[in-house]
Amino acid sequence: MNNVDTHLLTEITGNDYLDADALNIRKNGESIKRVTNPYIDIKPKKDQSGIEVYVKENTKFGIIHIPVIITESGLKDVVYNDFYIGDNANVIIMAGCGIHNDLHKNSEHDGIHRFFLGNNAKVKYVEKHYGEGSGNGKKILNPTTEIYMNSGSHMTMNTTQIKGVDDTIRITKAELGADTTLVINEHILTNNANCAKTDFTIELNGEGSSTHITSRSVACDNSVQEFKSNIIGNAKCYAHVECDAILKDQGKVIAIPEINAQNIDANLIHEAAIGKIAGEQLLKLMSLGLSEKESEEAIIKGFLRG
């Protein structure tokens, strides 16, 4: 790996991948490094591009890193990754993609990830996206996540689009069984003429299932964001969706919520708030000696952290 590769990995992983229990680094459409252990196995798919990750039942506190980096202008990389999490296992999965594009052709990564959680399994999934480069070729990232949760399982999904991604369509689908919990925290920053679309479809099929989705986004310059959510309650369940956005410059945000109760005991809530940076917040920080720009940046960082 060269300096650009290392920089991209640092942006999306913070170099935590160096301490991973299991590891798969993908560069420009090819796996360049893989590490496994007796509890976590990573195998290449036989029929299509991607990997299969197997976590044995009762595995505790395993850490898996699967970063992707793209440095080749004009490359469209599509990968299909499946994760099979055994009963009672507890793991952290760190993913994400960094694109460096200095030329005029578009570079794109489409990642389709499917998670199959066994009974009482626990997963924390962290995904970061980042783009950079001096060329006018776009940096495009389209993640699709499918989640299938068996009885008593729990999953937390933290996704972050740091900056520099020109276009993204982010699709998340989940089917929840009995007594399951899915928590999703999404953070998106767009600027220039970036376009970001998010689409959640969550089916709460088991009694006692619950989900809490929080989307925090900042749209700057002439960027546009669109948030869609469709929450379907097919049993006695609970869902709470929050969509909060800050507009700056000529940025635009569209929120399209949908909640569908198919059971009399389904408790579904959706909240949305879109607005600009409050003037009193700016004045408070500026009174401490920060410039207006520094104050805006501090407010945006704090907002995205939640």
Image (cartoon, helix red, strand yellow):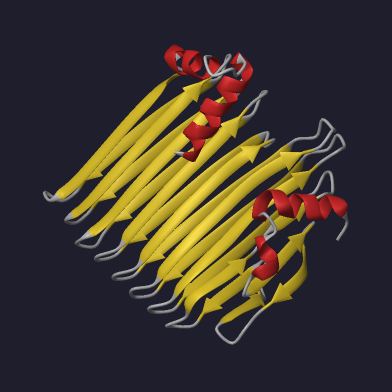
* Left or right placement of residue 69 versus residue 89 in this view: right
Q: Residue at x 61, y 46 (%)?
A: 142
Image: 225 above or below 236: above
- Residue 179, given in percent of the width and then of the height, sits at 24, 65
Of residue 244 and residue 31, the one placed in the foreground of this image is 244
Q: Residue at x 38, y 78 (%)?
A: 88
- Residue 268, given in percent of the width and then of the height, sits at 23, 43
Quadrant showing the N terminus? bottom right
Q: Is residue 221 visible?
A: no
Quadrant showing the C terminus? top left
Image: 23 above or below 126: below
Residue 21: name its quadrant: bottom right
- Residue 241, given in percent of the width and then of the height, sits at 33, 40
* Left or right placement of residue 306 versus residue 103 in this view: left
Residue 147: name its quadrant: bottom left
Of residue 158 and residue 278, the one placed in the foreground of this image is 278
- Residue 89, given in percent of the width and then of the height, sits at 43, 77
Identity of the residue furthest to the left in this view: 264
* Left or right placement of residue 278 versus residue 233 in this view: right
* Left or right placement of residue 68 versus residue 296 in this view: right
Image: 186 above or below 14: above
Q: Residue at x 37, y 25 (%)?
A: 273
Of residue 178 and residue 185, the one placed in the foreground of this image is 185
